[in-house]
Amino acid sequence: MKFNVASKALYSTLSGVSKVINAKNTISILDNFLLKVVDDSLEITASDSENTLSARLPIKNVEGEGRFCLNARRITDMAKELPDVDVEFEINDNTLATKISFPGGNFDIVALDGDQYPETIETTSAEESLKMVCPATQILNGVENTLFAVGTDEIRPQMMGILWDIKEDGITFVATDTRKLVRYIDRTSAPGITASCIVPVKPSIILKSLLDKEADVNVTISSRSAVFETEDITLNCRFIKGNFPDYNRVIPTNNPYTVTVDRSAILTAVRRVSVCADPGHGLVKFRFTPTRVEMKVDDPNVNSFAHEEVPCDFTGEQMVIGFCSAYLLEIFGILSTSNVILKLADPSRPGVFQPEENAENTDLVVILMPMTVQDF
């Protein structure tokens, strides 16, 4: 078996596919890539037994076809150091001795039999699966707006992923760690199906890093897993088991007081004052008045203190409330409008954060639980 491939395209594909491989695998064969040569295409596959990622790239001067495995770290390191030239792979079909040749040099390694590579994700018949096509931007926006709120507590595994609540007219993406919750509704494309699943963090990050914004994604959903496929990549991931909390019941609908504030101003102010906050909890105290918001933090352990105020428009008389600075920075980071809206009820009830105006066919809401504040 023999073929030629562009070195830079090879390295880009190998480094992208390697994102799915664990640092330590219980099955040693999963430390390898599975490479398949079919016609004028090279398909590179990696897996961690829960997720399987494949990418395809064109090759030329192909002689024969087949499948073989190469150590992922070694072949990626080799490809990284190759000059920007066409590289020739020559694999002995009997011994699997592999020669990688380029102008002025070559690498010699031994491959493994491709038949040893496990089929790690179960297949589902067409009758048991649902299919939809959606633009990559719909998935990317859903992941980017919710990933920061995913829980990390293994006691609540169903919160360690992003809920996809799919309706015929759009997709609702939800994530929560019990302190904060984000709900992002995107109706830019109508799936035409109804389904619900919890996608883990790892495949969500892979989709975020590898999807082309201009691509359309074919999504096949079964009871336990999903397949995301574009012209260049295929990702098969297993869902998180369990029931996601009823997010609609958690989001307050009657917070009577509204704060309108410049996003950039309050973001930079929170970032500055948080330098003096107690790192144990990051509490920032807020005092809202009709025309301004005051922020105060202190850390009695090191006698540090910070105070700042920013203009705002508050519909109430005065309110003192506390929030964690780290969570605020995450929230203000995803609310991209020039002004943000914060709806409040009282110091013990969650605040509702929204952009001043949502993009067409979208709706973004973030809620954050307050921290106990005795006085300002």
Image (cartoon, helix red, strand yellow):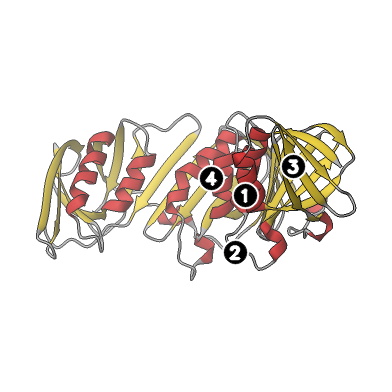
> Type of residue at label 1?
Ser
Crowd around label 3: few <14 · some 14–19 · many ≥20 (10 Å):
many
Q: Residue at x 90, y 53 (%)?
A: 94
Q: CA distance from mark 1 to mark 2?
A: 13 Å
Q: Is residue 70 among the parts visible in the rendering?
A: yes
Which labelled disc corresponds to residue 18?
1
Q: Residue furthest front?
A: 104
Instruction: Please determine whether, in this image, residue 27 is positioned above or below residue 127.
Output: below
Eye-nearest disc, 4 or 2: 2
Left or right: residue 255 versus residue 121 is left
Are the residues tagged 1 and 2 within 8 Å (C-beta)?
no
Q: Residue at x 69, y 34 (%)?
A: 104
Q: CA distance from mark 4 to mark 3?
A: 47 Å
Q: CA distance from mark 4 to mark 2?
A: 34 Å
Instruction: Please determine whether, in this image, residue 258 is positioned above or below residue 74.
Output: above
In the rendered image, which quarter is residue 239 located in? bottom right
Secondary structure beneath disc 4?
A: strand
> Type of residue at label 3?
Ile
How far across and how far down the image is residue 281, in percent?
Answer: 26, 61
Are the residues tagged 3 and 1 within 8 Å (C-beta)?
no
The residue nearer to you, when weighing 183 against 82, is 82
In the rendered image, the quadrant that contains the C terminus is bottom left
> Would you name the residue on which mark 3 appears?
100
Crowd around label 2: few <14 · some 14–19 · many ≥20 (10 Å):
few
Q: CA distance from mark 4 to mark 1?
A: 29 Å
Looking at the image, is mark 4 or mark 1 earlier in the sequence? 1
The residue nearer to you, when weighing 290 against 91, is 91
> Would you name the residue on which mark 4 appears?
172
> Would you name the residue on which mark 2 appears?
24
Looking at the image, is mark 4 or mark 2 earlier in the sequence? 2
Secondary structure beneath disc 3?
A: strand
